[in-house]
Image: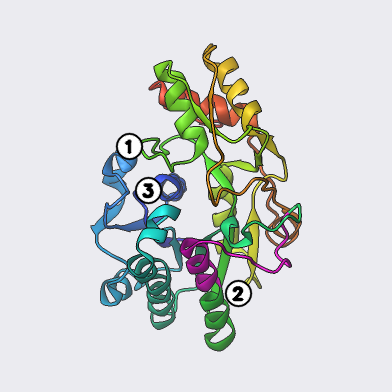
Amino acid sequence: MVQKALVTGGAGFIGSHLVEALVDAGRHVTVIDNLSTGRLENLAGFVDRISFVEGDIRDLALLERLADGCDAVFHQAAVVSVPLTVKDPVGSAHVNEIGTVNVLEACRRRRVESVVLASSCAVYGDSPQLPKTEAMRPRPSSPYAVQKLAGEHHATVFAERYGLKAVCLRYFNVYGPRQDPSSPYSGVISIFMDRAVRGRRPVIYGDGRQFRDFVFVTDVVKANLLAASGAGLGGRVLNIGTGRRVRINDLWHSIGRISGTEVAPEYLAARNGDIRESLADIGRARGQLGFAPSVSFDDGLGATYRWFCGENQQPGK
């Protein structure tokens, strides 16, 4: 049972939901975030119940100090923009790879019981095999994917060489409240939600028949908490998704139904590097974590839409 936790990137989309869940469970939580993409307003409802440090995961001494006395560290901090990693592979590697090694080393030095690292389904690249299983050979096609895969390998080495319980979760397409739609490379659901609220046409790249495995953010949080408390998970890599596919055309139709929007999408040419089909096999997470997604796609979309409209409600809240 986690009592004291450090969350890197805790002011971000997923990180802030994780922090909120830990705080609601009565845990002592420290957040480190350099606010490059994270936002303090994501923590506004519970910031008085946490310790917030504006800092960077490239600072090993700071990480070591913050990890002291923690029984779990949740590593969410990263450069998550694939195009940015393409533009700056060296700078992003310092964050995504060296920063991850710093987190692992700080936890090793301070004898933290559990470390849960956020990885990504991007490591599978454009492999046509479906669903994606952890036994597949990774085919990373961007610096971001390479950096995430490297983090997984570092975690495995720390588990095998030092006995650190480090677990890597390969997130599929996470969505929900607090996801920033301001970048064209944000999650497609947040971008579509923003367009629906504003009554603007969304852009669909390609024919719209491509599909994704969309998983609601609170289910991702649940997976993190299960990974931190589970036994015998050191060095494991687990897919976190739903095992259900949603086509992009159907996504916009669903958002239109929820919002009452009848705006037709604009179709543009498919973008180079976009993965056409992604679907998770979550059998390993189900068997080793006891993980099962509990938020239906319709409920998750509804909660996300209400948040974009300012109601700020989530399933189960």
Between 69 and 135, which is closer to the camera in this rendering?
A: 135
Q: Residue at x 45, y 47 (%)?
A: 14
Which mark's residue is nearer the viewer, 3 or 2?
Answer: 3
Between 55 and 181, which is closer to the camera in this rendering?
A: 181
Q: Residue at x 60, y 36 (%)?
A: 206
Q: Which mark is residue 286?
A: none
Which mark's residue is nearer the viewer, 3 or 1?
Answer: 3
Nearest to N terminus: mark 3 or mark 1:
3
Picture coordinates of residue 163 (x, y %)?
55, 83
Which mark's residue is nearer the viewer, 2 or 1?
Answer: 2
Residue 18 shown left or right of residue 209 in the figure: left
141, above or below 211, in the image: below
User: Which residue is under mark 1?
Assistant: 45
- Colouring chosen for the image of the structure: rainbow
Which of the 4 quarters of the picture holds residue 312? top left
Please say whether residue 158 is one of the residues in the magenta stretch.
no
Question: Mark 3 and mark 2: span between their CA atoms?
Answer: 26 Å
User: Which residue is under mark 2?
Assistant: 234
Nearest to N terminus: mark 2 or mark 1:
1
- Whether the residues at callouts 3 and 2 have beta carbons within 8 Å, the answer is no
Label 1 element class: loop
Amino acid type of the residue tagged 1 in the rendering: Gly
Picture coordinates of residue 15 (x, y %)?
42, 51
Direction bottom: furthest residue: 161
Q: Which residues are magenta?
A: 132-152
Amino acid type of the residue tagged 3 in the rendering: Gly
Between 99 and 206, which is closer to the camera in this rendering?
A: 206
Disc 1 crowd rating (10 Å Cα; few below 14, some 14-19, many 20+) is few
Disc 3 crowd rating (10 Å Cα; few below 14, some 14-19, many 20+) is many
User: Which residue is under mark 3?
Assistant: 12
